[in-house]
Amino acid sequence: MTEESRPVGARIADAVDLLRGSGVTVETSAQAAATIYTVKRPAYHLEIVVDSVRFLGLSFDLLGCDGSVIVGYEVDTDLYRISLPRHRWFATEVETDIVALVEALIQGKVLVDTGPPRASMVVPTGDGLMLVQRRRFLTTSNPYGGDACSALAAGFRPLPP
């Protein structure tokens, strides 16, 4: 079976199983036709929503010592009806980004910097590394100009799974 012929969300389910296998507790719940995977760790919260007809989404929040959100990253299919063949490409791209983040968590490749002046994360996507930074009123996401080694040299540290 090729990746294109697998149901939407199957690669996410596989990645979540790997995350569980790495020792991370993943809660699974259902809401209507959606499966919701939730991870609550001291350093982060992760929620993935999979509704293979309507929606794929990931919400990843890096937490401060007091449990408050210091920077967040989100990716989703928005209002595209992903069951339609003309939107399958978009569902595949979003699914790839979600799987990349989950696999990076397992491997300790989500890089964070919580020091001044602003909290930041370097997260992998299907198109390469993305720099997510908290700004005064919003969060920005831009392609990261280096690689993981340069991020580590710049003061980022791996986020434990």
Image: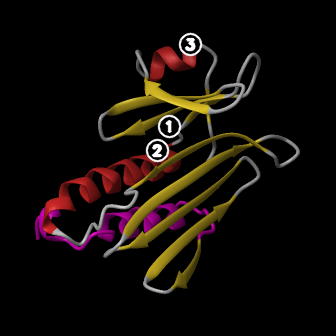
- Residue 79 position within the rendered picture, expressed as x and y whole percent measured from the top left: 38, 61
| Residue 76 in the image: above or below residue 16 | above
Alpha carbon distance from label 3 to label 1: 14 Å
* For residue 133, side relative to residue 55 (left or right): right
Q: Residue at x 40, y 63 (%)?
A: 56
The amino acid pointed to by label 2 is: Ala
The image shows residue 153 at horizontal and vertical percentages of: 56, 13
Q: How many marks?
A: 3
Distance from label 1 to label 2 (Cα)? Answer: 5 Å
Query: Hey, which residue is sitting farthest front in the picture?
Result: 79
For residue 95, the mark is none
Q: Which mark is residue 104?
A: 2
> What is the three-letter code of the residue carrying label 1?
Lys
Q: Is disc 2 surrounded by few (<14), some (14 to 19) or many (20+) residues within 10 Å?
A: many
Q: Are marks 1 and 2 in contact (CB under 8 Å)?
A: yes
Provide residue 159's location: percent of width, then percent of height.
Answer: 62, 39
Q: CA separation, marks 3 and 2?
A: 18 Å
* Residue 92 drawn above or below residue 101: below
25 within the magenta span: yes
Question: Circle 1 sits on which residue?
Answer: 109
Secondary structure of the residue carrying numbered label 1: loop
Q: Quadrant of the N terminus?
A: bottom left
Q: Which residue is mark 3?
A: 153
Residue furthest to the right: 66
Mark 3: secondary structure: helix
Magenta stretch contains residue 112: no
Q: Which residues are magenta?
A: 1-26
